[in-house]
Amino acid sequence: MRNVTWAEISLDAVTHNFKAMRKKVGKGRKILAMVKADAYGHGAIQIGKRLVQNGVDMLGVALLDEGRELRENSITTPILLLNPILPEQIYEALKHSLIITICNLHSVKEIAKVAKKNCFDAKIHIEVDTGMGGTGIDPKNALSLIKAILPFENLSIEGVFTHFHSSEETDKSFTQNQNNIFQNILRELRDNSIQIPLIHAANSAATLTIPESHFNMVRLGLALYGIYPPNSVSREVDLKPVLSLKTRIINTKQLEQGSTVGYGRTCKLVRPTIVATIPVGYKDGLFRSFSNLGNVLINGKTAPILGRICMDRCFVDISHIPDVIIGDEVVLFGRQKKRTIRIESAAKLIDTIPHEIVCALGRNALRIYT
């Protein structure tokens, strides 16, 4: 018996999006697929395995536990930890052949010590801070850091990268400036006859709109999940949504004009209304911000959300939809008949980003892979 609420994940859509983006960047460039945060709520193991089947060059995670989980599920593809790790995590990272991001010499010394003691061959990527702030080596110190690392035994610099902070904005000048800073560092490396195999900077938005940021590897997240980056002006690549969130009606009820619906009486009905209850709320990732604002699909028609979204249920107006019965399918995100509610549109409606919506789905909904 199917759960009342479930997320349908189309692995064929993942394949389609990967191949479409591979065509966009060309076969000469590698693709690092971001599967952090449980593959943006889609399921890191299933998504990771499908990407590996299609020849992805590297997977990207944020945390040690995420990398370990992939390894424990027989994924042997190179995995990059994009967050710096603590000294006590180094042994575990190297044991699982995870590639470590570094941005200071102290971390390098600790990694080299553990690698030498345990006969590990450690690979690292150096993050350069071109404006993101937080992690990353200052550009003016990047060359000296790399020179200091080169003599270390049991340790090799496999990659150098930067992180764009505004590539999803319509104004690309900020990203172009970051890219120029990064290119200056690459020029310094060439002038000093230092060759680093992998150079990467572009996320999905930059991959779609800034070709000069592609270098020899791109980092793809949203695009693989069929979601166009916010404010991206380019939709020339056909991306198919991977995730649909669905549930079923558990109750219908006729309410009179003047009745209120939900907590706080924020919705007062201006006419007699048939209200359906669906068992999805903010614990499932349907943010309270959608209260009195969002829509769902029932029988191929749009049904507005009424009142405040509760922890585990919400209410929708079905007065205009004929023949609705308890048990009917409801689509919160995804396609039903000829209509679609896209994650991008829903995110724009409540002034957030698509990443937040898909990640919020977490592990609450049963995932069905198709």
Image (cartoon, helix red, strand yellow):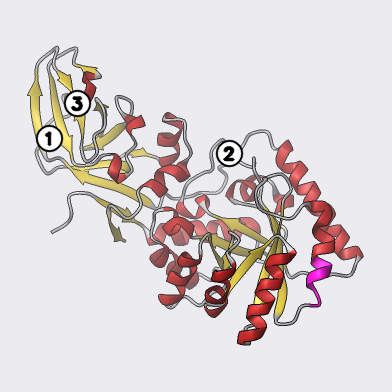
Q: Give the range drawn in magenta.
A: 146-151
With 237 as the anchor, is 164 left or right in this view? right
Secondary element at tag 3 = loop
Q: Position of residue 297 (x, y in %)?
A: 26, 36
Q: Where is residue 77 in the image (x, y as percent from the top left)?
A: 53, 74
Which mark is on residue 232?
Answer: 2
Q: Is residue 162 above or below residue 91?
A: above
With 240 as the anchor, is 317 left or right in this view? left
Q: Nearer the viewer, residue 331 or 357?
A: 357
Q: Is residue 223 magenta?
A: no
Task: State the residue position of label 1.
Answer: 324
Q: Count of labels shown? A: 3
Secondary element at tag 2 = loop
Q: Which of marks 1 and 3 is in front?
A: 3
Q: Is residue 165 above or below residue 108?
A: above
Task: State the residue position of label 3.
Answer: 262
